[in-house]
Amino acid sequence: MSGFLPYAVAAWLFAAGIYGMATSRDLIHLVVCLTVAQSATYVLLLGVGYLHGAAAPIFADIGPNTRVVDPVVQALTLTDVVVEAVVVSLLLALAMQAHKRFGTLDPDDLRAMSS
Amino acid sequence: MNTLVPLTVAVPLIAATVLAASAPFASRRFADGVSLAAAGSVCAMSGLLLAHGGDLVYWFGGWHPRHGLALGIAFTVAPLGAGLATFASAMVVIALLFSQRSLAEINNVFHALLLVFLAAMVGFSLSGDIFNMFVFFELMSVAAYALTGYRIDQRAPLEGTLNFAITNSIGALLVLTGISLLYGRTGALNLAQIGQALGTRPADALVVISLTLLVAGFFVKAAVVPFHFWLPDAYSVAPTPVCVVLSAVMSELGLYAVARIWWACFAGVLGGDRGAVEAILVGAGTVTALGPAVLCFAQTHLKRMLAYATVSYIGLFLIGFALLTPDGLAGTAIYLVADGCVKAALFVGVGILQHRLWSADELRLRGKGRAMPYTAALFVVGALALASLPPFGTFLGKSMIEDAAVKAGYGWVIAVFILASALTGGAVLRAAGRVFLGLGGAGEPEPSFEIDREESDEPETDDPRDRTPAMLFVPAAVLLAASLALGLVPGLDHAAQRAAAAFVDSAGYAATVLHGAASHTPQVAGPPPPTALDYLYALLSVLGAFTLAAVALLRPVRVFAPAVMRLRMLHSGRVGDYVAWLTLGVVAFGGLFAVTLL
């Protein structure tokens, strides 16, 4: 059961984030929903590399044959966090521009184009 | 030769850093020089790698695989990837030349962003590691968002960039989720190693889910229906030089990624069910080719028209790849480059119109281009090349795909190719007739689509003149000449077939990457020259384009207007709707894959 739990959490976070984005009426809320969906990937990655009862992968004070959790997924998660920080800061900068120049954060009020 | 491989990414990144750091005090001329030198050298290096032929494998930090187990990160340079890298850098060179005259008010950060974008595209084409591909994918996206939203002080670019950034970020999330699942199953990130590990047991739900997520994620970038909504919004508001690169290369890279992961990772485990995958992808390609082609024809804003044409051609390329044969892939490669050159030339042509006449709207420009015969010629030749007039490269690529489709039992897609190329070519011809000859009615601008048009059409330059600068006209002419040359170079079709045969050889790829086996280029018989039937199909496209343009200009038919309007209404410009469509697309692809593959 506990092995299944991280995947369920990841799926839930992903669905919640996507739902939030599809229905959002506020750009800041929209960006935060994106980070919610993104956190699903952190949970999933860490869940994939988790080994029950294993140590952290720091071979300073443990023997070379100790079971450790997978360090690769942790590196991937860190990379993912950095990538997301870039995307989110860019999106927030866009949201700030929208607020500053057009006085709105509602994506519907921004609509300049259709079709 | 091997040392060139990392330099193709390192050189533009270093140049971008220098430009960004020196932006506050360096001159525009310095930025133009440095960025052109960097992009030009990437083009030359990728060209050398392409000329080298077979697979080159470069392990970063010297982490070679041991006993067939890859621990390090590799760039695997195959001819198709090197060709895409060369094409991308050539387009960036064109965009840089073009921006010198068409974008007056930019600072040097623009050049830095364009170089980062180039580095990411090249890295994406060459990488042999799936997580590495994700990182380059994101880098490419972020640079593209910033470039699209460069003129952020206006409403339309802001909205277009937001739609672009939100949908593509979700696409990246799908890709990353797919990668996590694959890693959980195989413990590998190297494409070849994933393929080998997956092949050891039959396909199950996890394989199908990760295939769905990866395909859907990359299809968001490629703008396959129903993931395509962001593209017209973004491409119609991006600065025109940026459109050249976006339209000619970036979307196509999404398809390249799907081709790459299919043959490196999934072809082994799902090879038995490839018929189902073929059918699903050909279906998706058909919808993507036809729907947006109709919308392209219905557009009067030239950049938006070309954006829809881009989506339509993505559909055609998808059909070519979806045949899952080397012949189809070879045709797609030639078609992609030839068509990319034509679209880039047409975007430059729109840039010329904006430069001279301050607008990119067909109705507003009606008859104003009478004194511009050369630009008119540019548009007409471009339209005919879109409609695959022989001997343009578009004709060669299209007829190769059509031959491959007939062999694979999908002969009916020829009708899709003729319809889509006639509609897109016809749209450009009609625009040319109206702008340069003053034909057709002025048309009543539809009020619901005219909101804020003025804002988005502001000229990107502040020195309109009575003549077209050579820096604008020459790149466009060179691009059209390149597209023509692709159809005339002898042996190009054969070389593309050899490259495609090597690309689909999953076992050979794995042996080269994991065991250091010498790469061998499979021998393939050269393709037959185009037959009379191929010329007939091309004739039909060209005649269709002329007929459609003539009918639209001289005797507009209003029968289809309500249906087209309904189709246009789907493209609401509302990011929430796009997210909903995207979700629906993932579910649809997942459902179809699950039903057919499990």
Image (cartoon, coloured by chain):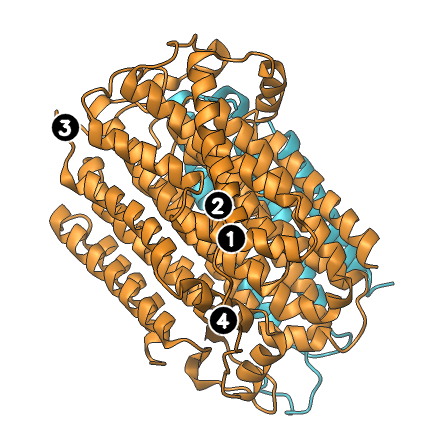
Chain colours: A cyan, B orange
Does residue B454 lie above or below B316 as drawn?
A: above
- Work out whether disc 2 and disc 3 sit on a shared chain: yes
Label pair 1/2, CB-CB below 8 angstroms = yes
Chain at numbered mark 4: B
Under mark 2, the amino acid is Tyr
Which of pointers 2 and 3 indicates the residue nearer the eye?
A: 2
Under mark 1, the amino acid is Thr
- Taking the spot 53% from the left edge, 27% from the top edge, the residue there is B295
Chain at numbered mark 3: B
Sequence-earlier tag: 3 or 1: 3
Q: Is residue A70 visible to the viewer in this orientation of the structure?
A: no
Q: Is B224 placed left or right of A10 in the picture?
A: left
Question: Secondary structure under badge 2?
Answer: helix
Q: Is residue B413 visible to the viewer in this orientation of the structure?
A: yes
Q: CA distance from mark 2 to mark 4?
A: 24 Å
Q: Which residue is mark 1?
A: B531
Q: Which residue is mark 4?
A: B498
Q: Which residue is mark 2?
A: B535
Q: Nearer the viewer, residue B459 or B161?
A: B459
Q: Which residue is mark 3?
A: B463
- Work out whether disc 2 and disc 4 sit on a shared chain: yes
Question: Secondary structure under badge 3?
Answer: loop
Which of pointers 2 and 4 indicates the residue nearer the eye?
A: 2
Looking at the rendered image, the quarter that the C terminus of chain B falls into is bottom right
Count every numbered label the image shows and give the total. Answer: 4
